[in-house]
Image (cartoon, helix red, strand yellow):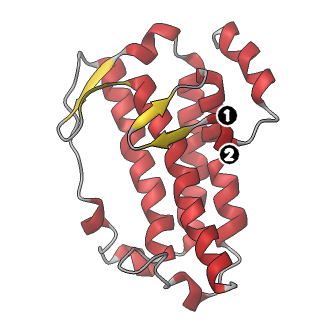
Amino acid sequence: MDLRLRDRRVAFEEVEVAALVRLEHAVLVQPPVAAVVLALRRPPRLAAAGELLLLDQQVETPYRDGGWTVRQVVHHVPESHMNAFVRFKLALTEDNPTIKPYEENLWVQLGDIPRTPIATSLDLLDLLHQRWVALLEVMKDGDFTRPLVHPAIGPITLDRLLQTYAWHGPHHVAHVTTLRQQRGF
């Protein structure tokens, strides 16, 4: 692990994830890499604390009118993060790869979603983040500047991708916790 990364992590361990990473209208506010790595450690625990307390009928509730159900949201997060993990591997091993997007709205409608317990996706997310953080901890500063191309977004760096996914987990946790507050779940 890069010593600068380890030293910076200590300073951020008591800071809330929401204060570390913000995405507003696609403009990223860039925190230190260590803070973003810390944020990736936390979303699985936040999700586990929030979603497992819901009853079956509550899990089938859309988080907003016309939105995905809680079940779909919870299953979406590890699917999306798996794609991001693979994108990291591609950008670290290939020169400026063009990644393949996926149809997340179609993925959440596939037959495995209603059949798979939420706990399965929470476990998957937790284990995936362990692997991802292990990769992040051995990356050098220059690795975070490695480029990739997203067909819908254009050229981005691994740093930008990392920040997006550190924001992504808490963003979806907020969907569910807001629903729970609104509905009294």
Q: How many marks?
A: 2
**Quarter of the image that includes the C terminus:** bottom right
Rendered residue at 58%/52% (across/down): 170
Rendered residue at 44%/47% (across/down): 81
Compared with 41, 6 (above or below) is above
Name the residue that disc number 1 marks.
38
Where residue 134 appears, as percent x and y from the top left, is: 59, 28
Q: Position of 91 compared to 122: left or right? A: left
In terms of secondary structure, where does tag 2 sit? loop
Where residue 53 appears, as percent x and y from the top left, is: 71, 77
Compared with 110, 90 (above or below) is above
Rendered residue at 46%/43% (across/down): 24
Q: Position of 30 compared to 93: left or right? A: right
In terms of secondary structure, where does tag 1 sit? helix
**Quarter of the image that includes the N terminus:** top right
Q: Which mark is residue 66?
A: none
Amino acid type assigned to the residue bearing label 2 in the image? Arg
Compared with 82, 99 (above or below) is above
Rendered residue at 63%/50% (across/down): 43
Crowdedness near tag 2: few (<14), some (14–19) or many (≥20) residues, C-alpha within 10 Å: some
Amino acid type assigned to the residue bearing label 1 in the image? Leu
**Residue nearest the observer in this picture, 111 or 19:** 19
* Gap in angstroms between the C-alphas marked 2 and 1: 7 Å
- Whether the residues at callouts 2 and 1 have beta carbons within 8 Å, the answer is yes
Name the residue that disc number 2 marks.
42
Where residue 69 appears, as percent x and y from the top left, is: 45, 77
**Residue nearest the observer in this picture, 55 or 167:** 167
Compared with 81, 85 (above or below) is above
Where residue 179 appears, as percent x and y from the top left, is: 59, 76
Crowdedness near tag 1: few (<14), some (14–19) or many (≥20) residues, C-alpha within 10 Å: many
